[in-house]
Image (cartoon, grey):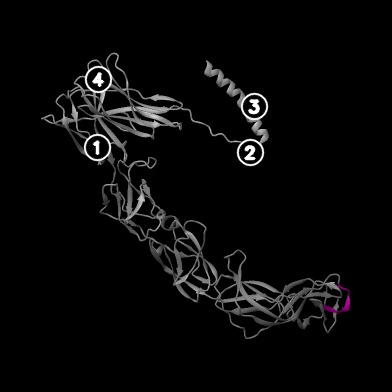
Amino acid sequence: MKTKSIAKIFLFWIPIFCLGILIGCKEKEVIEPIDYSPVQLKTTSFSNLAGKTVTLKGNISRLNGMPVEDYGFIIQKIKENEKEIVVSIGSKVSVGEVTLQYQHSSNFELGDRYRYTLYVKTKNGFYRGESNIFEVDGIKIDLLQLKLVPNNDKITVTGDFQFLTENIKMYYQHQYQQEVQLPFQVSSDRKSLTFTLPKSGKFYHGNTVSIFLQIRDQSGYQTNREVASIQILGSLNPPAQTKIYLNEPIQLTGIAVNGDAIPFSAPFYILINGKKIEYRSQIYLHEIEGLKGSKFQLGYYNGKDSVVFKDSIELIKPLGSNIHFERKVIHSPSLMNINGIDLYTYIMNPDQPKYYLGKHSVPHYFNSSYENQSFTVRNIPDGVYNFSYSSPFYSVTSTEQVEVRNLKWDTPANTTRYVGEPFTITGNFIDGHGYSIIGNGIGEGAIAQNGQISFIIPGYVIGETEIQIGYGVNINYNESYYAPKKQKLYIHDFQVDNISPLKGYPGDVVTIKGKGLLYIQTTLGGAYANSIYRSTDEIRFIIPAFAPKGKSAIEMKLNGTTVKYKDLFEVL
């Protein structure tokens, strides 16, 4: 009670003291929480019981962070008024197996029974596991400790098993499962026993499995005598599939290696062309840095053996015949579109391979789907080329070819035109391809046919001008390319040669002939004359209903220029 009262007074003053600190200080102290949860212990098996010595084992599965002051085993002979013997191991301890080679004060006698318990003492308390019992039963075991033993191996333990009865059973146990009975055979001279390590999916490479005899006498006392401590050796099976696509994983199966989530307690590596890789149940070749080629020798190293499988893994290569160009003729520069390059199956990372037209590099631009890819074509000479790409795993070349043309065009023999007249240019234009014609006041478009483009001279440009021809590249959104060549044009306004007839009734048709007539506006006696036909060299209009009777002038206008016809027109 006194201790509790002091604790209450102390707790009462803590908030006041902390409040004073908070008022006087700018920084707030951060208090780390203390783990007061119990230490978790387990008393396990014993072995090497002979003369005055015995090996006792236990396991600490959890410490709570409090400093350990002492740990060890408590041993007590099961007899009335016998005192407990505390055998300290020390204070330096960590989570895992605890072993004590205990030496008694005198030889153990046949029939003696002892209780032993693993304990841990901290400032926060004294913890002890459940007790186990060892009995001096006359059985002598040469404890077998083996590292990296394959499942399904036959194991022999030597000793003296004269007192081994049919009631004594063998079990195995490790940290991931409960006790499981295990068949065994005793030799005819009772000097050895043999068992087969179970082939179980619950064993994983590096796990230590404890094999023990469980002895229960008529009074019900049970003791576990450890026979062997065996570390499991994992192994891999050769892959069932030896020809795969780059996007497919290599599926790995084996003994004592199932499950990626459980870390192995001993080294285990996959070997690919001699390169070590941490084990996982499936491997993607494209994820492994530094791999080259399309053929791979697979194997594994398990800390004991290096095994290389007989059959290698081969990548299924892409076919050049599957690669197709969206357009068989392209300009440079341009955006070249290709289908049949299966990004997901053969490439995985579109920026990893190098792409070429002939020997010229064409950088990858983007992909609209796994099979449709676009590439930037720049500074490539005229020619016919195969497309190819080369990755760390393989190279492939298209069987189809694409023609590259750098835009060129010829100067027409006649560079003088009237407004509204067509202007045709011959060059290495691609049929069906769109082109732009730009100049001083000119901005026209044309689609190439039969190696030519043609556009109509606009009515708003008169006199000398200069044009360039280009096209949209479509690499960087609004990017366009124009050939460096520039061509001068001489554009005249309209010319009237003849008008007939020169008289008629409203509604009659009058024909004007000349040059550059396509865009002119016509009036008769000031009334607008509606045309029913227009071309660059002919216009037909209807005599307006509102035209004044009698003789009046025909006027033609274009871009502020007005021309009166030399003869008057008579409206009847």
- Mark 3–mark 1 Cα distance, whole angstroms, equals 61 Å
For mark 1, does the 10 Å Cα neighbourhood hold few (<14), some (14 to 19), or many (20 or more) residues? few
* Residue for point 37% across, 29% down: 71
Magenta segment: 547-555
Q: Position of residue 413 (x, y in %)?
A: 62, 86
Q: Residue furthest bottom?
A: 413
- Mark 2–mark 3 Cα distance, whole angstroms, equals 17 Å
Q: Amino acid at mark 4?
A: Arg
Foreground residue, 480 or 183? 183
Q: Residue 244: which quarter of the image?
A: bottom left
Q: Amino acid at mark 1?
A: Gln
- Mark 1–mark 4 Cα distance, whole angstroms, equals 26 Å
Q: Amino acid at mark 3?
A: Ile
Q: Residue 288: which quarter of the image?
A: bottom left
> Is residue 422 within the magenta segment?
no
Comes first in the chain, label 3 or label 4: 3
Reading the image, the residue beneath label 3 is 16
Comes first in the chain, label 1 or label 4: 4
Q: Which mark is residue 113?
A: 4
> Is residue 553 within the magenta segment?
yes
